[in-house]
Image (spheres, coloured by chain):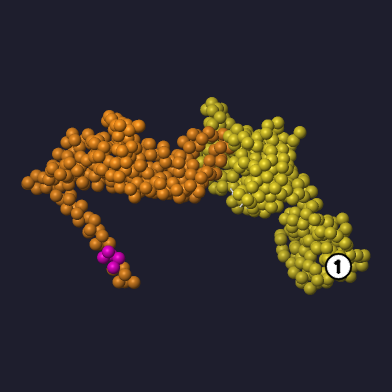
Amino acid sequence: MKTSRIGAWVAIAIGTLYFLLPLIATFEFSLKMNRDGYSFEAYKVVLSDPGFQATFGYSTLMALLTIIVGILLVVPTAYWIQLKLPRLRPVVEFITLMPLVIPAIVIVFGYLKLYNSSSWLPLTGNDRATDFLLMCSYVTLALPYLYRSIDTGLRAIDVRTLTEAAESLGASWPNILFKVIFPNVKSAILSGAFLTFAVVIGEFTMASLLGRPAFGPYLQLIGANRAYEPSALAIIAFLVTWASMGLIQVFARNARGTRKSA
Amino acid sequence: MAFLTIANLHKRFDDHVVVHDFNMSIEQGEFITFLGPSGCGKTTVLRMIAGFETPTSGAITVGKDDITHLSPQKRGIGMVFQSYALFPNMNVTDNIAFGLKMRKLSSADISRKVAEVIKLVELKGKENHYPHELSGGQRQRVALARALVVEPRILLLDEPLSALDARIRKNLREQIRDIQRRLGLTTIFVTHDQEEALTMSDRIFVMNQGRVEQEGRAEMVYTQPATEFVARFMGNYNLLGAADAHKLLGLDIQGHMAIRPESIHVLDASANQEGALDATIRQHQLLGSIIRYQVESQGITLQVDRLNRTASDLMPAGTAVKLQISRDDMREVR
Ligand SMILES: Nc1ncnc2c1ncn2[C@@H]1O[C@H](COP(=O)(O)OP(=O)(O)O)[C@@H](O)[C@H]1O
Ligand SMILES: [Mg+2]
């Protein structure tokens, strides 16, 4: 038993080093832009670059739109599957997993083939239409995360009885969905939303191939042309992702707290 | 004319028939109980009345309206669930106000009605509590208030007390019955507990395997069971098969003879009563106000209840006695 515990600690130590060393090295490097010692000069340069602000703002907006559209698509679907069509659940689960199996580049080429300017539904003709197409592809990318967390949230409440109670009190379907179901899976929706945010902020392939000014392609551009700024950007991107993860933890814990013995 | 009529109701799930030819008609203001073992179809009938299940065939009428295929929202039928089904995201006030908001009442009317019903179910002071902050009994009273406040034509309660502990259950069932009387509310109550059914109901429908086994006033169903199933389910009837009835009582019957334990009289072994049976006490069980004896006569064991008056009355095992059973207390059942 003693040796196995030591073994576990060794494994943890190696894992931590493997994960943290590059991060620490990157962070250290990002502080060395000024010759005369450590400073946050690289961060200052990056944060004041109009390119950074524009692309980060663009990606944030896209992430928010993706989250809203994704939630409006997934919550009613998952709800309906659970309430009326439980036999379809494996099928829907499989479909929502597809974006993890099919590479983004394949999906994008599919889109370009279907929606190019000479197709029946041209979505690449102007920037707004392409933004819309990009947002749709982000929704696709986010499906596995959104569906899984929302489905888990729905399973934790008694969807069927709550629906029936609301029905017998005269509630219409929109009212049942927005006044009863949504508020009770709020924390699940939020976890899905933060995951989606983290995925969309760093996404490169789709934005790049559709030629939109997103944060992912900007990261790549800076990475190819500068020395210290890419490290600063990498650290910033990490912090955004970690903040999202941290918020997921916070909301998950709150949800457990309020649901206890409810 | 009856207020709620159910005619030839059937329900089949895939090829499994759960409700067979269910018929009933009840008057306005009646308190009806569906009583039967778990799985006999009580909930399914209730869900068809509420509109959550569609009958395979048959008709449900309230007043003059055929509601068989109406959506639950339009039926004006309230429901209280065993699992409470309170909305976890709303406090007591908002849970109760939900149905009124759906009906788009003014907020002044809503607060007045909510305050009235909170008083009725004795939840004053809990207005701002969330469901997870309440006890089981309190939650079920919120659920009751939520169903009552919209003034339903019929109130359905599906085993509302089963998840509560004994003392609260007794208290709440009296309260439910009291409120029902005061409001004159037509009510159907589902339970598998015969004591609950007997204490609360005007009329009981005893159900078995998707059929109504017997219906009648509470005291009738208890004292005059029509079938062996009802006799077994309602009381601790002694049930004698045809052979035993012939051997012990010299009676020729078709089905079973049902004899309630409290209707058998125990006499001294020396008593000189005509028709009394020689018997021996085998064991006893203390049930508080009564003592239940297992008494054997000619190899047949009968249960006999006596009032538990004083400790010295207790008859030890092996005591020889005589039993007297009046013909009026015997009931032949199918
Ligand atoms: N949705 C359903 N699908 C299939 N069978 C069901 C369904 N609902 C109930 N049943 C079956 O119908 C029978 C009666 O159930 P129920 O009405 O819940 O009984 P009770 O409420 O008397 O315990 C049970 O055998 C149950 O398994
Ligand atoms: Mg039931």
Residue reaching furthest to the left? A36
Horizontal relation, residue A26 to residue B234: left or right:
left
Which quarter of the rendered picture does the N terminus of chain A lie within?
Answer: bottom left
Using the image as rendered, state which of residue B43 and residue A73 is in the foreground: A73
Using the image as rendered, state which of residue B238 and residue B198 is in the foreground: B238
Residue under numbered circle 1: B247
Inspect this view and state whether residue B151 appears. yes
Q: Which residues are magenta?
A: A7-11
Horizontal relation, residue B49 to residue A102: left or right:
right
Q: Residues within 10 Å of mark 1 (few under 14, many from 20)?
A: few
The answer to which image quadrant residue B81 occupies is top right
- Up-down: is A4 above or below B238? below
Chain B: its colour in the image is yellow
At 15% from the left and 44% from the top, the residue drawn is: A224
Q: Give the image location of residue B263, x and y in percent.
A: 82, 58
- Up-down: is B232 above or below A181? below
Using the image as rendered, state which of residue A165 and residue B175 is in the foreground: A165
Horizontal relation, residue B285 to residue A137: left or right:
right
At 54% from the left and 28% from the top, the residue drawn is: B104
Q: Give the image location of residue B38, x and y in percent.
A: 64, 53
Residue B63 on the magenta span: no
Horizontal relation, residue B83 to residue B22: left or right:
left
Label 1 chain ID: B
- Up-down: is B102 above or below A149? above
SS for callout 1: helix
Q: Give the image location of residue A181, x and y in percent.
A: 47, 40
At 50% from the left and 47% from the top, the residue drawn is: A86
Q: Give the image location of residue B170, x and y in percent.
A: 65, 49
- Up-down: is A133 above or below A18? above
Chain A: its colour in the image is orange
